[in-house]
Amino acid sequence: MANPLHRPICDMLGCEYPVLQAGMGGVARSELAAAVSQAGGFGCLGMVREPVELIAREITETRNRTARPFGVNLIPSATDPALFAEQLETCRAGGIETLVYFWDVLPDAVVRAKEMGMRVIYQVGSVEQARTAEAAGAAAIIAQGVEAGGHVHGGVSSLVLVQQVAEVVEIPVIASGGFATGRSLAAAMALGAQGIHCGTAFVAARESFAHDLHKDRIVAAAAEDTVHTDAFVINWPKGAAVRVLRTGVTDLLGDRLYGHDPDTILKHEIAEEEGRPIYLWSTDSPLRSMTGDLARLALFAGQCAGQVRDIRPAADIVRAIVDEAVTCIAEMGARQALQDV
């Protein structure tokens, strides 16, 4: 039976369904990436500024869990150039075919990856960035709307941005920001996207490396329970906005949601990870490997948190999205057929 969700991006990435798991730094490790890919989606390791030893280990462990393709998420513009060069070489040596870049578009980073035999999918937050990434040689674009959780690099909603980007680039477009269901996948396709890029839904997956506190908070949240701010900026460039769940810490900000400078924020340790201090207002989110006052860390989540109702295996999440999308598309086709009679 033909797969009604099949799109060219599936052939490019080697997946069955156009459901891409976001490369969430810290959260997306081998267990999650492998589970998503094994279920027919496209898993991705979140290796933002991680040491090459960890990247090599996670690539190996992911391959031990699945024979299906997966990607690695890197952030060229927020990573020391020397470390980034080592990360690229580690991915090449590990046989990675797809890299997912994010934040400012650095054309040279795309060229270098292509010269090493790897394709780049660039996540962007504006039409201008999409054009720049395509001109640099990106193989596909992830258009991220402001509804997204974690780092957000734009201010336009997915409903508007996805359609705009799909109209101006010739390479495949993937919709990101507010996508966690099959109906949202069908909607993304109607806007011109070939698939969706999901973060929040997979943070709450059983295989996610997120701490249970983070998962539980997402499950309990409603769409209105998120905050867009650049206060959690230690370790990232000034002005790097994020979307997090509302907490007592975010309430302290009042109306001072923006304008925070990482160079002027006092570092107050509130948690630790295997001897590494974790600071209040850093971009670290609670992980299984952390201890301390984790509720005061950045609880990244998008507005689609209200559609995440339980903690379940990643395969169940992929299957639920696929089944609902197929049903939704069939229902729309049936309604159109009735109108044509």
Image (spheres, rainbow, N blue to C red):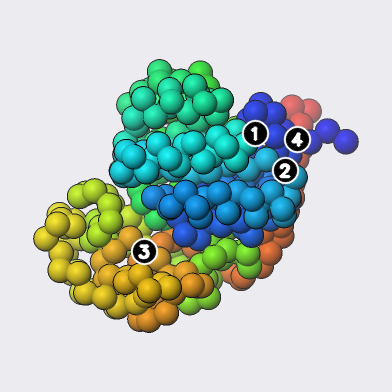
C-alpha span from label 3 to label 4? 39 Å
| Residue at 51 percent of width and 72 percent of height | 288
Figure check: 289 above or below 227: below
**Mark 3 in CB contact with mark 2 (< 8 angstroms):** no
Residue type (three-letter) at the residue carrying disc 4: Pro
Looking at the rendered structure, the secondary structure element under dot 3 is loop
Residue designated by label 2: 68
Residue designated by label 4: 4
C-alpha span from label 2 to label 1? 10 Å
Q: Position of residue 102 (x, y in %)?
A: 40, 40
Q: Earlier in the sequence, mark 1 or mark 4?
A: 4
Q: Earlier in the sequence, mark 3 or mark 1?
A: 1
| Residue at 65 percent of width and 28 percent of height | 12
Left or right of 327? Residue 227 is left
Residue designated by label 1: 13
Identify the residue at the far right of this view: 1
C-alpha span from label 3 to label 1? 29 Å
Looking at the rendered structure, the secondary structure element under dot 1 is helix
Left or right of 242? Residue 190 is right
Residue 320 picture quarter: bottom right
C-alpha span from label 1 to label 4? 17 Å
Tell which tag, 1 or 4, sits nearer the viewer: 1
Q: Is residue 201 visible?
A: no
Tell which tag, 2 or 1, sits nearer the viewer: 2
Residue type (three-letter) at the residue carrying disc 3: Asp
Q: Is residue 18 visible?
A: yes
| Picture disc at residue 284 | 3
Q: Position of residue 330 (x, y in %)?
A: 75, 40
Identify the residue at the far bottom of this view: 292
Q: Nearer the viewer, residue 281 or 278?
A: 278
